Every structure is written in structure tokens, then in C-alpha cells.
Amino acid sequence: MSDHMTVLVTGGAGYIGSHMVLALLDAGHQPVILDDFSTGHEQLVPNGVPVFRGNVADAGLVAEICNSYEIDAVAHFAASIVVPESVSDPLKYYLNNTASTTRFIAACVEAGIKRFVFSSTAAVYGNQDHNPINEDASTQPENPYGTSKLMSETILRDCARAADLSYVILRYFNVAGADSKGRAGQLSQPATHLIKIAVEAAVGKRSSIQLYGTDYPTPDGTCIRDYIHVSDLIGAHMAALAHLQADGESMLANCGYGHGASVRDVLDVVATLARKELAITDAPRRAGDAAILVADSSKLRRKLGWTPVYDDLQKIVSDALAWEQANP
């Protein structure tokens, strides 16, 4: 992607969005951040990157950004992402994710933005009988988070058909790790992602880890997930932007490696790399947790030429651990 692009990154001060901002800078592009800082962090914003503080649903603000900068594309990360919270507070998820995304798409179309990369999730698939899961699998989300994202996908698809808008929807599996140069990582409090929780325990930020469900139909009885390094996930976004920049057609793709690790596998790797025995308490299964979730990412590899660089659980954990140690 030689052409210089100005890219509006919503949620650019968050965990994944901040890595997108770094990748854009590294590639010589101009990121512009829109974040309400409800879960974003000032420290994740690199010097000199323009930041607009506000909500994606604020049409006036989006218009102001588009008047100030010639936006070539949008990468929309801003969303609420905690599955159990979505079950207890569904309205927050339908408002923050579906309704806000609808308003944001409307503002983008109004401003004449032609390219849109959207963060979606494997939660849209729910429990599947077959793994790895490809994009043709039925969508049967088990929680409002997954439903709110699936509804946003549908709205984006319909709007793109009616307007001159092309998109790439990326369905993330389990994102983990941190920038290898230590420039960004996960700061979410309280942590809800296994690898983040495990490295917190490894550096003494929490006393124990709860293992939810030890009786799943998997080799060691714990859930299996496809963990993808955040920098490889961002590689998929950069490939998606290049595809749209070259007038590629709208598409949907899974982001994962195509193989999984169990909860116990992850905890073992963390304990080994941290040289520390972790205090683990067995707990009952959580509602809505599928036994196995693994991505078939062959479409991403084939259509966007994506090749992972960090496909190694040790690498993912060591980057997450280094970030945790650097941010006590």
C-alpha cells in the first residue's frame, strides 16, 4: 500500500485500536483517533497523533473530523466488549455497539467516506458443532455482545449496498499479546481476557486465577480457543485497507490461526515463562462458553494475502508478560 492514507481509527486509544495506530504510523500513514476514553488510555496515544475526544454516535463531531482531515478510510474498533456484562446489561451493548455504529456509519456515508474496516467477533457464531469455523457457518450468538456485533455487521452490509461504501468485516477470535517493541498493550481493568489475567497473576497483581469449567469434551477438560497475536490481527487490518484502497470488493473474514490452545495450555506457558507457580482455583463452567472455538482463516490468507508472523503461543505470552512487567 504505497499510497499515503489518512485513516480514522475509532477506539484508537484502546487495546487493539492503539496497535492499529502504531501500524499506520510505521507504514507512513496518518492515523486520526476518535475515542471517548471510557475504556481508552492517554498513555496509548503516540505523540503527534490527532485525537478527537467524543463518541462515534456524535454526527457533528464525525463531520468536524471529516472537514478537518481528508479521511480515506475508517477502522472502527470502538465498542463495549465484555461478554458477561452484556448479559447483565444488554441495553449498554445495543446502545454502544449497534445504535452507535449505525449513527457512525450514517455520518461516514454523509461525509463521503468510501472504505470501512469493521471489528467483529467470533461471538457471532455461538456454539458450533464443527471446528475450525469458516465464514459460512450459521450465526447463532449466545449473548447480547455477539448479537450487537452481528446486527452491526448486517447494518454495515445493507448500508454499503445502498451507498458507495466498501467494507471488510473481520471476525476476531481470541486476541492477545502486545506490541513487541513495548509501545502498546492491554491495560483493561478489570481484565477479562485469560492471557491478561494469567500474566497479571504471574507478576503478582492478583493472587489467584479461576478456571471456569474442567469437564469440557476436550483433551484436558478445559476450553480451547484460537489465540491470535494482536500484531498479526492488525496485519489483517492493514491488508484489508490495502484491499479496499485497490478497489477490492467488500468481504468478511475470520481472524485466527486455525489451531487452538486450552486454558491449561495457556496457564502452563505463562507459569513456565514467568518461572512462577500460579494459584489456580477450579470453578464451575460459565454460561455461554463454547468448548472449542477455532477459526478457519483460509479466506483471510487467500483473499488478502495475510501471513501471520507471531503464530506461537510462547511469543504471544512473552509479549503480554513483558508489557505487564513494564506497566506495574
Image: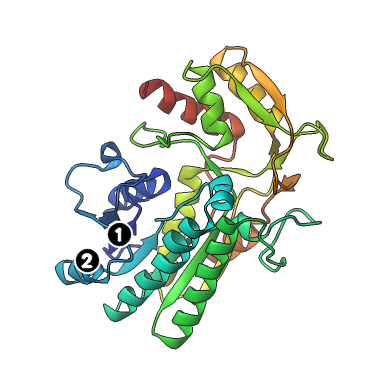
Q: In the image, residue 65 lies at what x, y percent?
A: 20, 66
Q: State if disc 2 and disc 1 touch (CB < 8 Å).
A: yes
Q: In the image, residue 39 lies at what x, y percent?
A: 37, 44
Label annotation for residue 61: 2
Q: Is residue 309 left or right of residue 50?
A: right
Q: Amino acid at mark 1?
A: Asn
Q: Nearer the viewer, residue 69 or 83?
A: 83
Locate the N terminus by quadrant: bottom left
**How would you rate the neighbour count of disc 2 (Cα within 10 Å): few for under 14, some for 14-19, many for 20 or more?**
some
Q: Answer yes or no: is residue 32 visible.
A: yes
Give the residue drawn at x 68%, y 29%. 211
Label 1: element kind: loop
The residue carrying mark 1 is 55
Q: Amino acid at mark 2?
A: Leu
Type of colouring = rainbow
Q: In the image, residue 328 lies at what x, y percent?
A: 37, 21
Taking the view exactly as shown, the residue that stands out farthest to the bottom is 162
Q: Answer yes or no: is residue 315 visible.
A: no
Give the residue drawn at x 29%, y 70%. 72
The tag earlier along the polypeptide, 1 or 2, is 1
Q: Nearer the viewer, residue 29 or 286?
A: 286
Specify the quadrant of the image occupied by residue 107: bottom left
Work out whether 173 lies above or below 250.
above
Work out whether 42 lies above or below 202.
below
Specify the quadrant of the image occupied by residue 223: top right
Q: In the image, residue 202 lies at what x, y percent?
A: 53, 18
Label 2: element kind: helix
How many numbered circles are shown?
Answer: 2
Specify the quadrant of the image occupied by residue 62: bottom left
